[in-house]
Image (cartoon, rainbow, N blue to C red):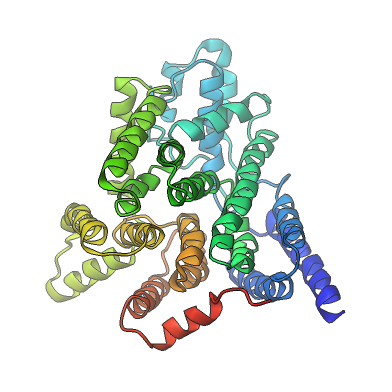
Amino acid sequence: MIRKYGSWVLFIVLTLLYVYFAFSVKRTDHSILIVGFLVLVVLSALLYFQVRFSHWTLLFSFGLLFRLAFLFSTPHLSNDFYRFTWDGELAKDGYEVFEFLPKNYKDHIAPEDSTKYGELYRAHSSEFPSGMNSKKYYSIYPTINQLVFVSAAAINIPNERNLIIMRAWILIAEIISFFVLRALLVRKNKQSLLGIYWLHPLIIIELTGNVHMEGMAITFMLLAIYFALKNKWVSYAFTASLAIMTKLTPLFLLGAMFRQFDFKRWFLSSALAVIVTFVLFFLILDLNGLVNFKSSFGLYFAWFSFNSGIFYALRDLTFLISGADISATISLVFPFITMLLFGYIIFLKTFDSVTTLLLLFTTYFFFSPIVHPWYITVLIPLGILSKKIFPLVWSILIFGTYIAYGSEFSQPMFWIYLEYFTIIYLLIKEFGLKGNWVKQLGETIYSPDTN
C-alpha cells in the first residue's frame, strides 16, 4: 500500500513541478531553476525506486505525462526554437535554407513575404530579448531536423502551434526510444533500469521541454545499436545514417561498431551508412549550400565557447604562468588530440561497442568548445547500457551551467571546474583497477533484476 500510494503522491507532485517548470521558470531565475532541478532529481529517483519493478505500463504512463506537461508551453531555457521556426518557414515557402544569412533576408525574400519574415526576425521574449541566437550564421541543422521544421511550418502560425508539432515529433521519438531501450535492457535482464532514462529530469526538460533534436538522434542511435547487436548490418547502416542526419555526432557509431561486426560487414555497413547520409544531405542542399553549412559550422565552434572545462583550464593556467592567451592554439590542437584518442579507443582497446560509443562521445565533449546541458542527454542511455555512473553524475552537474545566463552572460568557472574534475575522477575510477568504490557502487546500481 505504501508503495502504491507513495508512487501516486510522487507522480502528482512531480507533474505539478514540471508544469511550473514549463510555464514559469526562466533561465535567469537561478535559485529556483537549480533548486527546482535538484528537487526533480531527488523526487524522480524516489519514484524510480517505487515503480522500477512494477509493470512497464505504469512507468511509461508517468514519464509520458511528465513530458506532456510541456506540450503547450514556450521554451524558457533555450531560444533555439526561433531558428527552427525560421528554417521551417523558409523551406515551406520554397526558399533555400542554406542560401543566405537571416540578417540578409531582405535581399532574398520576395516583397509579399517581407512582413512575415520581418516579424520572425524580430521575434523575441523577455528572457530572450535578442530573439534568434544565430542571425549571423547559416543554418547548421541537417536533413531530419529540416524535415521536422518544415512539417511544423505547415500550420502557418510561427513560434506558436508549430512548437506543438516539433514536440510531437520528439515525443514520438522518445516513445520509440523507451521501447528500444527496454528491448536492449531485457537482453541483459536489467529492464528495471529503464526508469533511470525515462524519468530523468534532464531528458524530460531538455528534449520534449526545450525542443532539442537530441531526442530524435537518441532514438535512431538506439535503433542502430539494437540492429547491430542483432547482426542486421543493413538496418544498422540505415538507422545510423538517420542518426547522423539528425545530429552529426552519431557518426561515432561507425567507429564504435568496428569490433561488433567482422571487418567485411563493418566496412560494408559503414560505406552504406555514408552513402545514405550523403544522399539525405543533398536532398536539402546543393554544393553552394554545403559550403555555407561547412563555413557556419566551423565559425560557430571557432567564435563561441561554453562549458569547455579542459579548454578553460589550459587557457587559464597558461595565462597565469606566462600571461599569454593560447586560446587559438588550443582550438587548433584539440581536434588532433580528439582524433588520436578516437583511434586509441577504437583500434587499441577492446571495449564492447556501446562502451566504445560512450567513450567516443565523452572524449568529444571533453575537447569540444561547446557543451550545452542537452548535449549530455545522449550519454544517459549509453551509461545505463554500459553500467557506468559518470554520465548520470554529469547529467546532474551540467544543469548548473545555466547560472551563466543572467542580466549579463558570465560562465560560472568554479562550477565548471568542479564539474569536469568530478567527471574525470569518476571516469578514471570506473575504467581503472577493479575493486574501487565507484565500480562497486556501479555494480550495485546496475545489478541484474532479482525481483
Residue 74 on image: x %, y %: 66, 46
**In the image: residue 417, left or right of residue 330:** right
Q: Residue at x 61, y 57 (%)?
A: 182
Q: Residue at x 43, y 34 (%)?
A: 142
Nearer to the camera, 165 or 22: 165
User: Looking at the picture, does residue 399 appear above or below residue 290?
Assistant: below
- Total residue callouts: 0
Q: Is residue 385 left or right of residue 279?
A: right
Q: Position of residue 49 (x, y in %)?
A: 69, 76
The spot of residue 314 in percent (x, y) is 22, 68
The answer to whether residue 228 shows anywhere in this view is: yes
Q: Residue at x 70, y 50 (%)?
A: 70
Residue at 45% in and 55% down: 375
Question: Residue 283 in the image: x percent, y percent?
Answer: 42, 22
Residue 403 in view (yes/no): no
Report the front residue among 302 and 182.
182
